[in-house]
Image (spheres, rainbow, N blue to C red):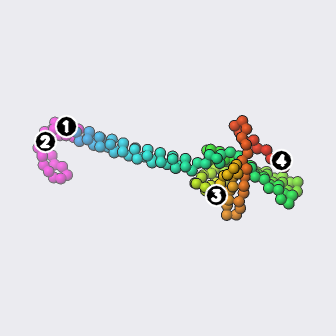
Amino acid sequence: MKTTNTLQKTTDLKPSQNKNEMLTLSVLKLKKMKTISIVFLMFITVGLVCSCDKEQDDFSPELIGTWFFEENADGMVSSERLTFSANNTGSVDMLHVENGITAKELLKFTYSINKNEMTVFMGEETNQSTYSISNNKLTISTSEETVAYTKLPEVGGSNVNIAIL
C-alpha cells in the first residue's frame, strides 16, 4: 500500500506497519502532552505560591481587633468603634450626641491592605487612606483628616467595647 503525507513523500507501508507507526506516534504525542502539562502545572503552582506569599506580605495582623475613637467638643460627643477581622471584613459603629439627641449608625465594610495603604469598600463607595500602628494606637490619614484610634483590650477571646458617654 502506498500512502502520501502532506510533504508529498511516497512510502511503501504494509497495513500492519501503518497501524504500529500510528500507535507509536500517538503514544509519543501523549507523552509530549503529559510533559507539557506537568511543566504548565509547575508554573501555575509556583505562580499561586508566589501570589499567596504576596497576600501574606500585605496582611497586617496587628490591625485585627477593635479600635476606639472619641471626641468631645462644644457639647457634642462623637465616638467610633472600628473593628477589623482577619477575613478582610469589618464594621464601624458610630455614635453622635448633640443637644441631647443621639444618633447611631453601624456600617459594614471590606478592606484590603497594601503596605501602609488601606482601601475600604462600603457598598458603592471606596475610600483610600494610609495607616500606621504604634503602641496600641492606629492612625488613619486621608486627604481630609487624620484620626487616632486606641486598641481595645481583648477579654476571653472577644473584644470588650466600653464607651461612657
Element on which disc 1 rests: helix
Q: Earlier in the sequence, mark 1 or mark 4?
A: 1
Q: Which residue is mark 2?
A: 13
9 part of magenta stretch:
yes
Q: Which mark is residue 164?
A: 4
Neighbour tally class for label 3: few under 14, some 14-19, many 20 plus, Cα within 10 Å = some
Relative horizontal placement of residue 101, taking residue 14 as reference (left or right): right
Q: Report the span colored magenta.
A: 3-23
Q: Nearer the viewer, mark 1 or mark 4?
A: 4
Q: Earlier in the sequence, mark 1 or mark 3?
A: 1
Nearer to us: label 2 or label 3: 3
Dot 2 and dot 3 residues touching (CB under 8 Å): no
Q: State whether residue 124 appears in this view.
A: no
Residue flagged by tag 4: what amino acid is it? Answer: Ile
> Circle 1 sits on which residue?
20
Residue bearing mark 3: 130
Q: Residue at x 23, y 38 (%)?
A: 23
* Left or right: where 13 falls relative to 131: left
Identify residue type, mark 2. Answer: Leu
Where is residue 112? Give x, y as percent: 60, 52
Q: Are marks 1 and 4 in contact (CB under 8 Å)?
A: no
Q: Is residue 162 left or right of residue 5?
A: right
The secondary element bearing badge 3 is classed as strand
x and y percentages locating residue 28 in the rendered image = 26, 41
Tell me how far mark 4 sits from mark 2, CA to CA.
Answer: 96 Å
> Marks 1 and 3: which is nearer the front?
3
